[in-house]
Amino acid sequence: MRSVLVTGGTGQLGQTVVPILQEREWNVVAVGRFTSASLIEQLLDVSDMRGVVHLAGGIVAGKGLADHSTEDVEMMIDLNLRSTITTLQLTVPILEANGGGSIVTIGAQAVHHPVPGRALYAATKAAVVALTQAVAEEGRSTNIRANCILPSIIRTEANRAWGMMDAPDDVARWISPEAIGTTIADLLEPTNGISGAVIPMYGQLPF
């Protein structure tokens, strides 16, 4: 049995992604957004780990860059960038020892198409993209692939509740969690040769 670690696996996107991976016959180790690295290490059966999906992240939206507090800055760096660094530092050596594997991270549409009120979010997610591409280059000699998905607003239940109040006409055009989950599952397959890609998944929203 091949195993995959899914960080943020208990969140709303994770609750869709995990069953899709299980249907593809992955043994999924799903951890929450704030699970410590030491606990993750205890949960992993490192002998059969072949994949890493880093869904964990977060946003403080609706503020201009100058309006963000120091706490906002630290939180966004922790949730988006530092969590990615920690996860990959922990798991890349395991994948190397197992002969390779696949990594999928989550960026954001705002990386390519920034909008007001999301400057800090866009910056931390852009760092996730750069880190993922660097890991892809480092992994070419060890059979490790790494790719990053850039979703627009994801049609989760929480986002739908907000969207139906503020932008009901847009909700149907948001990207579905099922589409993201299927793409992640495809990228994890060992027969998939894609690495270093930044994949936009914007649904039908305009830029």
Image (cartoon, rainbow, N blue to C red):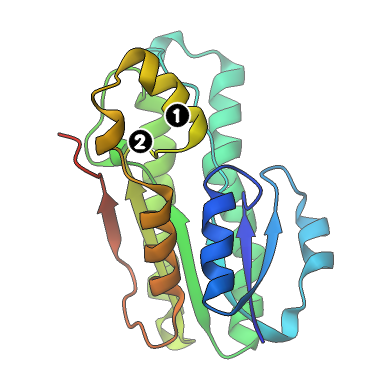
Look at label 1 and name its amino acid: Asn
Residue 120 seen:
yes
From this viewpoint, is residue 130 visible? Answer: no
Residue occupying the far left of the picture: 206
- Residue drawn at (61%, 37%), measured in percent from left and top? 78
Badge 1 density bin: few <14, some 14–19, many ≥20, Cα 10 Å? some
The residue under the point 38% across, 58% down is 148
Judging depth in this view, the residue of 171 and 110 nearest the camera is 171
Q: Percent x, y for residue 169? A: 23, 23
Q: Position of residue 52 (x, y in %)?
A: 56, 67
- Give the residue number, with chain letter if any, for mark 2: 153
Q: Quadrant of residue 146?
A: bottom left
Looking at the image, which residue is at 53% across and 85% down? 100
How far across and how far down the image is residue 119, in percent?
Answer: 35, 25
In the rendered image of this protein, does residue 117 appear above or below residue 174? Answer: above
SS type, badge 2: loop
Q: Is residue 140 above or below residue 77?
A: below
> How many dots with numbers?
2
Q: Name which quarter of the figure residue 66 lies in.
A: top left
Residue 29, x across and y down, in percent: 70, 65
Which quadrant does the C terminus fall into? top left
Q: Secondary structure at mark 1?
A: helix
Q: Is residue 11 left or right of residue 81?
A: right
* In the foreground, 202 or 56: 202
Q: Which residue is mark 1?
A: 159
Q: Do callouts 2 and 1 mark residues in contact (Cβ within 8 Å)?
A: yes
Amino acid found under the numbered disc labelled 2: Ile
Residue extending farthest to the top is 67
First of labels 2, 1 by sequence position = 2
Q: How much space separates mark 2 and mark 1, taking CA atoms?
A: 8 Å
Query: In the image shown, does 189 or 173 lie closer to the viewer?
Result: 173
Q: In terms of image quadrants, where is residue 180? A: bottom left
